[in-house]
């Protein structure tokens, strides 16, 4: 969606692309090669939590955007006022109504302040007047329903040089996180394959859910997936992440043995050139140690609690015990993720099968 904002006599023409439920990419219109990723979440009090460039801001809209007064927002307690766009060559209405009558025909020369149309608003008739002298060209017909901001006609100004307009911004935005697509992610997660894979798969899920995933973004996502699943440290970091939440909740000797194993392989895989053959992480040993300890627990309720605690860890280790592809330790992990995404997609698409109308299918999905 294209958005135009005027701040301090400078017009910013922005293109906002929704890439996920709460995520957006903001670029200068006409320059899609650079953008700034951001997330926006609605707060319970009507405000917005905006995360951009690694920092969070709380914003509130303090006045509605309209053609007369513009828009005001409060960001971390500071008020930012966006000016209305003064463009007398575009004849618009700032209220909802109906175009009842054209007071002048197409191509009429109008003087400043001359009425050109009559609209009906809540059973009242209002005249609309031009703000500058010029020649009118109609863009709407009598009887048309109008929403705020709709274009009724255009005006070719007699003296356009006398009208001051905002300067259109060109160049790069001076905001944290601004840069080429994918530039901010690559350096941050280069040594954390489990985070790289998770973020890449989240983007794939958003794309399959109907959010925007451009061909360039998809190429970067697939490159991240390839780098992550071929990284021998992927199972180590994923298992270690699940293991970290079990500190103090399972037997100390078992926990220490598992931590010792992951720490050893972290050091082994550190700073290893890509493609070099190394000893594969023994994910089956993680499952064996957990199963062995569980079999020694005699109390049934205690054993059930232990199994419940360690199931996420066992489930994380399981795909890495089945990987058969050489030099691709995350192959089975990736396959299971893609299968889950396809299943979710098929589940959604089934609502639109069998001759069900689009509106009914959407309504059923919302339920």
Image (cartoon, rainbow, N blue to C red):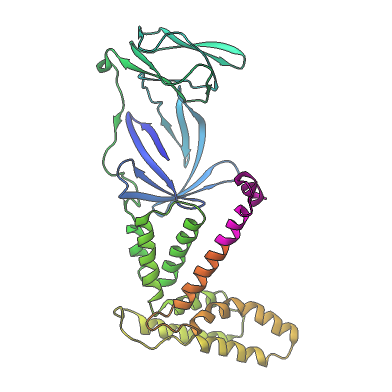
Rendered-image quadrant of the N terminus:
top left
Spot occupied by residue 319 in the image (x, y as percentages of width and height): 51, 79
Image position of 246 with respect to 207: above or below: below
Residue 301 or 22: which is nearer the viewer? 22
Q: Residue furthest right?
A: 300
Spot occupied by residue 258 in the image (x, y as percentages of width and height): 52, 85
User: In terms of secondary structure, what is the magenta stretch mainly?
Assistant: helix
Residue found 66% across the figure and 50% down from its top: 364
Q: Quadrant of residue 83?
A: top left
Residue found 36% across the figure and 71% down from its top: 227
Residue 245 highlighted magenta (yes or no): no
Image position of 84 with respect to 218: above or below: above
Left or right, 54 with respect to 288, comes to: left
Residue found 27% across the figure and 13% down from its top: 159
Q: Is residue 348 at all visible to an observer of this figure?
A: yes
Q: Quadrant of residue 11?
A: top left
Q: Is residue 247 at all visible to an observer of this figure?
A: no
Spot occupied by residue 207 in the image (x, y as percentages of width and height): 47, 56
Residue found 35% across the figure and 36% down from its top: 13
Residue 100 or 94: which is nearer the viewer? 100
Spot occupied by residue 120 in the image (x, y as percentages of width and height): 56, 15
Mark count: 0
Left or right, 225 with respect to 43, comes to: left
Residue 358 highlighted magenta (yes or no): yes
Q: Residue furthest front?
A: 355
- Magenta residues, start to end: 345-367
Left or right, 42 with respect to 104, comes to: right
């Amino acid at each position: 969606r294209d958005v135009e904002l005027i701040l301090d006599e400078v017009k910013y023409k922005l293109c906002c692309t929704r890439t996920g439920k709460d995520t957006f990419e903001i670029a200068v219109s006409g320059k899609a090669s650079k953008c700034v990723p951001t997330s926006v979440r609605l707060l319970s009090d009507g405000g917005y939590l905006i995360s951009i460039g690694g920092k969070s801001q709380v914003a509130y809209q303090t006045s509605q955007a309209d053609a007369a007064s513009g828009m005001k927002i409060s960001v971390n307690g500071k008020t930012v006022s966006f000016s209305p766009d003064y463009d007398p060559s575009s004849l618009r209405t700032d209220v909802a109504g109906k175009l009842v009558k054209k007071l002048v025909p197409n191509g009429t020369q109008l003087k400043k302040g001359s009425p050109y149309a009559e609209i009906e608003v809540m059973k009242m008739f209002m005249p609309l007047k031009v703000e500058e002298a010029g020649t009118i060209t109609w863009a709407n017909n009598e009887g048309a329903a109008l929403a705020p901001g709709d274009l009724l006609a255009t005006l070719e100004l007699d003296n356009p040089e006398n009208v001051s307009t905002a300067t259109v911004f060109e160049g790069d935005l001076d905001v944290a996180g601004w840069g080429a697509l994918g530039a901010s992610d690559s350096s941050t997660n280069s040594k954390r394959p489990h985070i790289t894979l998770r973020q890449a798969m989240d983007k794939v899920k958003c794309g399959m859910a109907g959010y925007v995933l451009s061909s360039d973004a998809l190429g970067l996502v697939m490159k991240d997936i390839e780098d992550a699943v071929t990284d021998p440290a992927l199972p180590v970091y994923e298992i270690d992440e699940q293991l970290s939440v079990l500190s103090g909740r399972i037997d100390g000797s078992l926990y220490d043995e598992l931590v010792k194993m992951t720490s050893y392989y972290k050091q082994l895989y550190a700073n290893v050139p890509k493609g070099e053959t190394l000893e594969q992480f023994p994910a089956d040993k993680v499952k064996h140690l957990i199963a062995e300890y569980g079999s020694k627990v005699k109390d049934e309720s205690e054993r059930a609690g232990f199994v419940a605690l360690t199931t996420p860890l066992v489930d994380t280790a399981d795909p890495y015990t089945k990987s058969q592809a050489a030099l691709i330790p995350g192959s089975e992990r990736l396959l299971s993720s893609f299968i889950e995404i396809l299943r979710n997609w098929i589940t959604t698409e089934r609502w639109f099968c069998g001759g069900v109308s689009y509106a009914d299918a959407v309504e059923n999905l919302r339920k």
